[in-house]
Image (cartoon, helix red, strand yellow):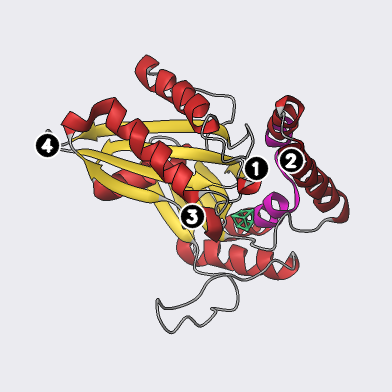
């Protein structure tokens, strides 16, 4: 049994929330750059330039990429041969509290659907835990903005809706969202499981590498087709029109009930902030 002190987890969370809020991932920066080089609309191109310039300033000045510094979401994979000394949930929330304080990041969490008092330290984090068969802890840590999250959807389709029904739902969702999720976006699409599982699949899909593909040929094709079809909608960067609405589509799927085709669409803005750390 490997012993891991909970304070190690706090340290990782604290440093990671600052890092992801200050520094845009290099592969994402390059993807936006490539999109800008291909963009024919002058206004769209200038917005992509602004996004790139903003990322450079944030990087140099150690400042947040966006005023919305997000809700912290943590996907944990805990090896069954690990023993954690201390309380895991407390350790994660302490890391969030320390990181948002140290990094001068905006605290965005409120405590109640209607009272809406700020919790003051950006806690609690949203934590998802899976047990795996090793002696490590993998943490996928994200800071998820509210604007893009608000444009996300879960819908229970029927098997008869099929792949065309899924595509139509995605296209309608992205088109109706317009500029609100701060395009260019990344789309996480969760297919199958049940109501709540589809949402988790969609969220975790957003944490995949930008240049990977679903290993299933049909789902890989769906990722490629949807990327083209979303960009053909013409929503454009920040909704001003143009060819660059979406940078990537990631589809994750799971087995499901014979009567159901759950579909979750989790939308991520261009300020995609996440990192994977293994302890
Ligand atoms: S959706 Fe993203 S880019 Fe837009 S305000 Fe929120 S965090 Fe910032």
Instruction: Specify the quadrant that holds the C terminus.
Output: top right
The answer to which of marks 2 and 3 sits earlier in the sequence is 2
Viewer can see residue 79: no
First-in-chain label (4 vs 2) = 2
Spatial CA span between label 2 and label 3: 21 Å
How far apart marks 3 and 1 lie (CA) works out to 17 Å
Secondary structure of the residue carrying tag 4 is: loop
Q: Nearer the viewer, mark 3 or mark 1?
A: 1
Query: Which of the labelled discs sits on residue 259, or is there none?
Result: 4
SS category of the residue bearing label 3:
helix
**Disc number at residue 237?**
1
The crowd level at tag 3 (other Cα within 10 Å; few <14, some 14-19, many 20+) is some
For ligand 1, the image quadrant comes to bottom right
**Residue 113 horizontal/vertical position (percent):** 40, 76
Q: Is mark 2 within 8 Å of ligand 1?
A: no
- Residue labelled with disc 3: 149
Q: Are marks 4 and 3 in contact (CB under 8 Å)?
A: no
Q: Quadrant of the N terminus?
A: top left
Inspect the magenta stretch and tell me whether residue 11 lies in it: no
Dot 1 or dot 4, earlier in sequence: 1
Whether residue 86 is visible? yes
User: Image quarter for residue 53?
Assistant: top right
Closer to us: mark 1 or mark 4? 1
Q: CA distance from mark 1 to mark 2?
A: 7 Å
Residue 144 image point, x, y percent: 55, 54
Q: CA distance from mark 1 to mark 4?
A: 38 Å
Q: Residue 19 magenta-drawn?
A: yes
User: Is there a contact, CB below 8 Å, between mark 3 and mark 1?
Assistant: no
Judging depth in this view, the residue of 69 and 127 nearest the camera is 69
Residue 49 lies left or right of residue 5; in this view the side is right
Q: Which residues are magenta?
A: 15-30
> Is the CB of the residue bearing disc 3 within 8 angstroms of ligand 1?
yes
């Amino acid at each position: 049994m490997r012993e891991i002190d909970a304070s190690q987890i706090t340290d990782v969370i604290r440093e990671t929330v600052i890092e992801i809020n200050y520094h845009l991932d290099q592969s994402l920066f390059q993807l936006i750059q490539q999109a800008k080089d291909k963009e024919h609309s002058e206004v769209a191109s200038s917005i992509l330039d602004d996004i790139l310039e903003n990322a450079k300033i944030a990087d140099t000045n150690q400042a947040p990429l966006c005023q919305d510094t997000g809700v912290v979401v943590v996907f944990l994979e805990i090896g069954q041969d690990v023993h954690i000394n201390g309380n895991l949930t407390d350790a994660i929330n302490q890391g969030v509290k320390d990181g948002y304080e140290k990094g001068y990041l905006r605290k965005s969490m409120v405590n109640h659907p209607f009272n809406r008092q700020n919790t003051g330290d950006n806690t609690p984090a949203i934590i998802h835990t899976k047990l795996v068969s090793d002696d490590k802890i993998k943490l996928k840590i994200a800071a998820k903005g509210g604007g893009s999250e608000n444009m996300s959807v879960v819908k229970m389709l029927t098997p008869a809706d099929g792949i065309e029904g899924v595509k139509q739902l995605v296209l309608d969702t992205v088109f109706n969202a317009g500029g609100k999720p701060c395009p260019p976006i990344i789309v996480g699409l969760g297919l199958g499981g049940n109501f709540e599982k589809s949402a988790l699949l969609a969220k975790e899909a957003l944490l995949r590498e930008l240049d990977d593909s679903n290993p299933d040929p049909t789902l890989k094709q769906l990722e490629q087709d949807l990327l083209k079809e979303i960009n053909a909608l013409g929503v454009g960067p920040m909704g001003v029109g143009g060819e660059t609405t979406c940078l990537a589509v990631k589809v994750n799927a799971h087995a499901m009930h014979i009567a159901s085709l759950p579909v979750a669409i989790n939308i991520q803005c261009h300020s995609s902030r996440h990192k994977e750390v293994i302890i």
